Image (cartoon, rainbow, N blue to C red):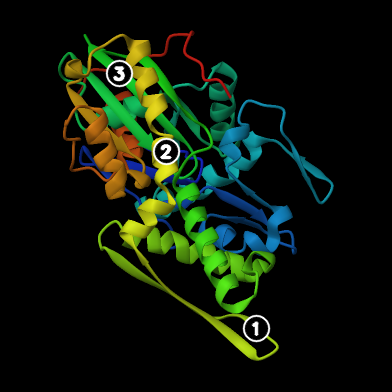
Amino acid sequence: MARAVGIDLGTTNSVVSVLEGGEPTVITNAEGARTTPSVVAFAKNGEVLVGEVAKRQAVTNVDRTIRSVKRHMGTGWKINLDGKDFNPQQISAFILQKLKRDAEAYLGETVTDAVITVPAYFNDSERQATKEAGEIAGLNVLRIVNEPTAAALAYGLDKDDQTILVFDLGGGTFDVSLLEIGDGVVEVKATNGDNHLGGDDWDQRVVDHLVKTFQAGHGVDLSKDKMALQRLREAAEKAKIELSSSSETSINLPYITASAEGPLHLDEKLTRAQFQQLTADLLERCKVPFHNVIKDAGIALSEIDHVVLVGGSTRMPAVAELVKELTGGQDANKGVNPDEVVAIGAALQAGVLKGEVKDVLLLDVTPLSLGIET
């Protein structure tokens, strides 16, 4: 029997998970990482690059690198490269193909069936486009599941009748959803978000800060230098991640550029307090969607039974504190990696559909009235 996988096809990163002996396992990709950047690039020699390799050359090959293609799903967006048109489904299929290959290498057998997740606010054409992307990649898409629903499943929260708030801050998008579970049906009561707010924006603030500081100290504008910018972006993301566990980090980039006097090096310290100051307004932007969801669902904060954090960006202490403050002091469910929780829920659902897990098959309901203003 061919194996079924669960795939979280994200705006900035994607994850694939499989059940092994009824337990979900996140698959490590060929590069040794558990998440794969959702970046596709066409190298000058015609080779298609996907994931980390595509991300690393993104700044120096801007016109031939596609990131955040998920934002174009279900639209008429097209990119023409070397005389050939590619639509969002085809670009997404390259990402799914890589995930499929990595899963097959891990399992040592072919993978044909998959459950793929989408944001709760995706409409029919966006869902259809996602299914098509899977088919182009050679996958039989068993079901398209809402990301917040998958997250709730990963925590086993589908067992009792309850109300769950899912706070999802990814690399490029932010959404809050309120789920109501009862009688094996998961209903998305309300969802709201910001399609252009995510961890990448936090990184960008660090990049801007470094550019400004460097210009003040050396009179050189690094934002004009593509190679320097790529290194700054990678360093900013690393600094942000380090500041989630320590109160200070060093950003050290030797030979970042050269002036008439010779090579210049960037060496800066960044404290968590500084970082939070640089990004305070981004955090502020998370509040309105949260309040809207509570209002739209017509519930009181005290009625929320569980809070689930999704997306690597929720690892930032300030984000976790904000969620606690917004939910009236509730502690979020812990124990599953926020960047893996959606893929794990998708794998569990795949297992149910393939009969590997003896469990109730969930009905995932999204009222048609749920939309998102973009």
Residue 351 visible to an observer of this rendering: no
Cα distance, mark 3 to mark 2? 19 Å
Say which residue label 1 marks: 258
Nearest the viewer among 203 and 343 is 203
Q: Residue furthest right?
A: 83
Quarter of the image holding residue 287? top left
Quarter of the image holding residue 19? top left
Which structural element holds mark 1? strand
Say which residue label 3 marks: 179
Cα distance, mark 3 to mark 1? 54 Å
Under mark 3, the amino acid is: Leu
Residue 86, x across and y down, in percent: 72, 40
Image position of 308 with respect to 234: above or below: above
**Which residue occupies 45% across, 50% down?**
202
| Among the two numbered marks 3 and 2 on one chain, the one whose residue lies closer to the N terminus | 2
Residue 204 visible to an observer of this rendering: yes
Which structural element holds mark 2? strand
Under mark 2, the amino acid is: Asp
Residue 97, x across and y down, in percent: 54, 45
Nearest the viewer among 174 and 274 is 274
With 294 as the anchor, is 93 left or right in this view? Answer: right
Q: Nearer the viewer, mark 3 or mark 1?
A: 1
Residue 113, x across and y down, in percent: 43, 33
